């Protein structure tokens, strides 16, 4: 279903170090367009090599009896269809250098694993299910670097399954299939992105203070919500460099992506989509009609289009900047 609803927004200008205004990130006259609505909780948009957009609808046991769906949007026709259901409670999605779809499947009756699907045959394989002999917590987000290494976060937000891992970490899957715990000091890691120069790993630290639902009337204490920047070594190691963005009482960091200039885009819940420079200067704001979760640039002729999931919907907006996809560079 294509809706074509346009949402007014405010475009922020970029500013140079001297304070002079530069080109705005948001294209003149651009509006946030709603492409799909009616989902339960949408996440993880990812652009396939042919330009089609895949995203997750996380139905969740507390929200619906449905078993999670992987959705497919075709920018050429405007059609949205269910690509795969049940989805294993798929959350983050990415495409590797060979055009295969990588999916982080969460908990709450989901797969608790990372899978890879050959788009030609439709066949899938398991890439990560355990670490140190224990089941993963709930793979959340996933990204791929220019060397073909796969990075995924493994927090726990929902689900009654036992939590077996001693840490909520960030892992790396190397091309040889080996699995490595890379980040153990990000609190509860969520969204991930690798900078275009491959020197920085961005991690959304989104600790909501709980690993599942609490009794009515009880509120957890959340740790500081932030975006962390890690120095990324040639060997795939990651060392915390700085807290790039720190959130106050409102907003948080969910999904992340980058453009060719290295700017960082983030779905920030009630704050909509925010954009920061690599040194942490806020550059632009894109309001969303519901809490923003994930962001992703299109590919090919669609590289200046930013796709946004929020609430139970998929949106897009035309920008001046081009997205970074390692397979296309």
Image: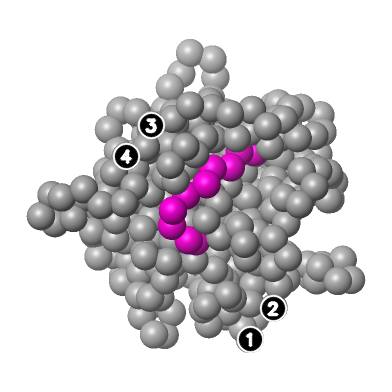
The residue at which mark 2 appears reads as 98
Q: Which of marks 3 and 1 is in front?
A: 3
Q: Describe the colour scheme in one phrase.
A: one colour
Is tag 2's residue or tag 1's residue first in the polypeptide sequence?
A: 2
> Which residue range is magenta in the image?
313-323
Is tag 2's residue or tag 3's residue first in the polypeptide sequence?
A: 3
Can residue 324 be spotted in the picture?
Answer: yes
C-alpha separation, residue under disc 2 versus residue under disc 3:
38 Å
The residue at which mark 3 appears reads as 10
C-alpha separation, residue under disc 2 versus residue under disc 1:
15 Å
Q: Which of marks 2 and 3 is in front?
A: 3
The residue at which mark 1 appears reads as 176
Q: In this view, does 129 lie above or below 21?
A: below
Secondary structure beneath disc 4? loop
Q: Tell me where residue 207 appears, x and y as whole percent.
A: 41, 41
At a point 64% along the width and 38% down the height, the residue shown is 314
| Numbered label tally | 4
The one nearer the camera, 95 or 137, is 95
At a point 52% along the width and 78% down the height, the residue shown is 329
Is tag 3's residue or tag 1's residue first in the polypeptide sequence?
A: 3
Q: Is residue 18 above or below residue 209?
A: below
At a point 48% along the width and 26% down the height, the residue shown is 8
Q: Tell me where residue 68 appears, x and y as whole percent.
A: 77, 41
Secondary structure beneath disc 3? loop
């Amino acid at each position: 279903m294509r809706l074509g609803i346009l949402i007014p927004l405010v475009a922020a200008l970029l500013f140079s170090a001297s304070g002079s205004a530069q080109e705005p990130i948001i294209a003149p006259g651009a509006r946030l367009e709603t492409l799909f609505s009616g989902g339960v909780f949408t996440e993880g948009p990812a652009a396939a090599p042919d330009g089609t957009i895949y995203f997750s609808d996380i139905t969740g046991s507390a929200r619906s009896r449905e078993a999670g769906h992987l959705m497919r949007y075709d920018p050429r026709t405007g059609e949205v269809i269910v690509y795969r259901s049940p989805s294993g409670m798929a959350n983050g999605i990415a495409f590797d250098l060979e055009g295969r779809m990588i999916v982080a499947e969460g908990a709450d009756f989901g797969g608790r694993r990372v899978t890879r699907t050959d788009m030609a045959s439709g066949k899938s394989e398991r890439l990560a299910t355990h670490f140190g002999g224990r089941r993963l917590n709930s793979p959340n987000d996933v990204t791929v670097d220019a060397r073909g290494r796969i990075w995924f976060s493994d927090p726990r937000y929902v689900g009654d399954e036992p939590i077996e891992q001693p840490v909520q970490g960030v892992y790396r899957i190397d091309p040889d299939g080996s699995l490595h715990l890379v980040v153990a000091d990000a609190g509860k890691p969520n969204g991930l992105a690798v900078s275009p120069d491959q020197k920085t790993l961005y991690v959304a630290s989104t600790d909501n203070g709980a690993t599942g639902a609490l009794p009515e009337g009880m509120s957890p204490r959340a740790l500081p919500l932030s975006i962390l920047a890690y120095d990324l070594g040639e060997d795939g190691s990651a060392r915390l460099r700085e807290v790039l963005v720190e959130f106050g009482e409102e907003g948080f960091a969910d999904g992340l992506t980058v453009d060719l200039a290295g700017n960082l885009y983030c779905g920030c819940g009630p704050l909509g989509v925010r954009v920061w420079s690599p040194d942490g200067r806020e550059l632009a704001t894109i309001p969303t009609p519901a809490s923003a979760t994930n962001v992703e640039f299109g590919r090919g002729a669609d590289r200046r289009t930013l796709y946004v999931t929020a609430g139970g919907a998929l949106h897009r907006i035309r920008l001046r900047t081009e997205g970074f996809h390692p397979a296309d560079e």
